[in-house]
Every structure is written in C-alpha cells, then in structure tokens.
Image (cartoon, rainbow, N blue to C red):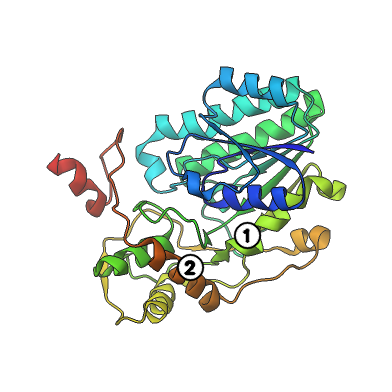
Amino acid sequence: MKCLVTGGAGFIGSHVAEELVKLGHEVVVIDDLSGGFEENLPSGAVFVKGSVCDHKLINDLFGKYKFDYVYHLAAYAAENLSNFIKRFNYHNNLIGSVNLINASVNHNVKCFVFTSSIAVYGHNQTPMAEELTPEPADSYGIAKYAVEQELKRCKEFFDLNYIIFRPHNVYGERQNMGDKYRNVLGIFINQLLKGDSMTVFGDGEQTRAFTYIGDIAPTIAKAPFVEKAYNQVFNIGADKPYSVNQIADYIAEAMGVEKKTVNLDARHEVVNAFSDHSKLNSIFGHGSEADLKEGIRKMVEWSKKQGFKSSKKFEGVEILKNMPPSWLEDYVQS
C-alpha cells in the first residue's frame, strides 16, 4: 500500500514510518525538519522536505502518489508553550491538518490515521476514558480536538474513514533532546548531560503515565489494516502513572549521577493526566508495556551517544503575559 507519513523525520513519526517499511509498504515521508532530523528517516522511505501548511505541495503529492493511507503525525506538540504561540499553533496544528484532510477527501484515501493527544481531556477525571467530554486546557489541545471533530464531520459528509489515537507522554530514542519546552524526560537527560540540575515545575508531584515509543508505534502503523478500528478514537500509551519527582529519581539512577533538582514556579497545567486503555486493548489486544526503568535506560544509552544538545528559544512568541519566568528570561534579555 502507498502510505504518507507526515512528520516522519520526527520522533513518533519516524518510528511509525519504520514500522510501515518493515511491513513492506511504499512509504513517503513529508517533514519540514523544524523538529525532526534526516538521520531519523528509515531506509527505503521516500523523503520530501516540506510543510503540511503548503497546500499546493500537499495536493501535488497526493496527485503523484495516489496514497491509500495517511498517517498524520506532524505537529508542534508543546502544550504549555502553545498558549503563548496561538497563531503559530493553529496554523501548524489545525490548518496544516485541514490541508491533508482536504487532499484525502479529494483523492479518495481509504483511511486517515491521526495522532491527537491526551491534551484534549484537559482538567478531567482520571483515568481519562474516550467517552469523557473533552475540555482542553491549552491551545494545543484545542487544535487537536478541532481536527478530531473535522474528521468526524468528513466521515459523515464525504465517507472519509479515520482512526484517532490519543497518545501521551511518549519517550525513547530519536526524541528531540534540544527542545526545552516539551518532553520532560528528554529535558532532564539533556540537563544532566550538560552537568546541570534538573528543573522541576512546582512541587514535582504532578503525575503522568510515561509511554515507551516501542510500545505504540507498531499499533499505530497497523491500525488502518484493522477495520474494527475504523472511525473510532483510542487512548494509547502506558497505564501506570508516575510523578515527575519519581522520573527525576529514575533518570539520575540511569545516568549514574547524584540526583540534583531545582524547583521552579508552578505552571498553569493539568496536575494529573493518565488514561484508560481498555477500548484499545479490546480491538488491538493488550500489547507489551516496557518497564519504565528499562525504557529510560535505553533512552539514556542512546542519548549519551548523541551528547548534549543546545536548547534554543522559540522564535516568534506572540504573548509574554503569564509566561513561566524560566522561559520569559530569554525574551526579556533579548
């Protein structure tokens, strides 16, 4: 089958593209390399450097390759930062998605696989289940939920099949270690590689279920070949929640260093966020779940080979009001 993977040079996208190549499919990757790297691309995939926001490029690709399936993983997935970059967030995460949906309808794509986010739930009861009414607490979650709604409407209007996954707190090899705005495990490891202390927002007792990439990429890749999954929404990820403080303990242990943390002012964020996966398991079966310490060990081994990555400030912040002081200092100084 001919498969398009957006964001396929990024973290989750490259693993999904790799799984599709292993399954023998023809894979085309589009990525603007804003957060991905060419070395992440699997051998055998066709690479197109470009943005999903370029609707002409998207239409040309669909016309050329006649895709059977679309896997949409391209996004700027910084939940907290999204509140301060609203225009950028909606342009990339919503309008870019609409470009792909339009092309999928016009070119009769068989199924559109979309990676949404646990962020759509917001301040909701835990464990978060698919039947809960989403109440996104940040602009990123709002954009993701809007795309979900658009896909549901397009099924009704145009019979475009879809599968929506809501992953959460995914970690592992190929994560962008130089991004200081997202992915707490990568941030902590990168800080320790530099010899700095790990920075913890608030008291560190906020909880998440941290998901190893190897546990979810195969399921996402095979999803459109499981017809029972069509036109449904699935939480996907690990079951057991851990506090940020526990994560700091495990990372320091895996790095073989003394735990050093600095507590920063608390952010406006969801305190406890973890999901129920019984619906996913009923369709795809109960897959493997990596032991968190073992998953962190694998990520640390990979990260040590990469070395410390410099973190750059986000260019183009639109709002400074109420920004966390540790981020704000970049913009005040400039």
Residue occupying image coordinates x 15% and y 42%: 332
Q: Which amino acid, mark 1?
A: Met
Who is closer to the viewer here, 127 or 280? Answer: 280
Q: Quadrant of residue 267?
A: bottom left
- Residue found at the very far right of the displayed protein: 227
User: Is residue 251 or residue 1 the one in the foreground?
Assistant: 1
Residue 262 lies, in percent from the top left, at: 25, 70
Which residue position is annotated with label 2?
299
Which label belongs to residue 128? 1
Instruction: Give the structural element (helix, strand or loop) at label 2.
Output: helix
Q: Is residue 299 visible?
A: yes
In the picture provided, is 11 more to the left or to the right than 281?
Answer: left
- Residue at 77% over, 63% down: 281
**Where is residue 133 shown, x and y percent of the image?**
64, 48
Mark number, residue 309: none
Q: Are marks 2 and 1 in contact (CB under 8 Å)?
A: no
Q: What's under tag 2, amino acid-wise?
A: Met
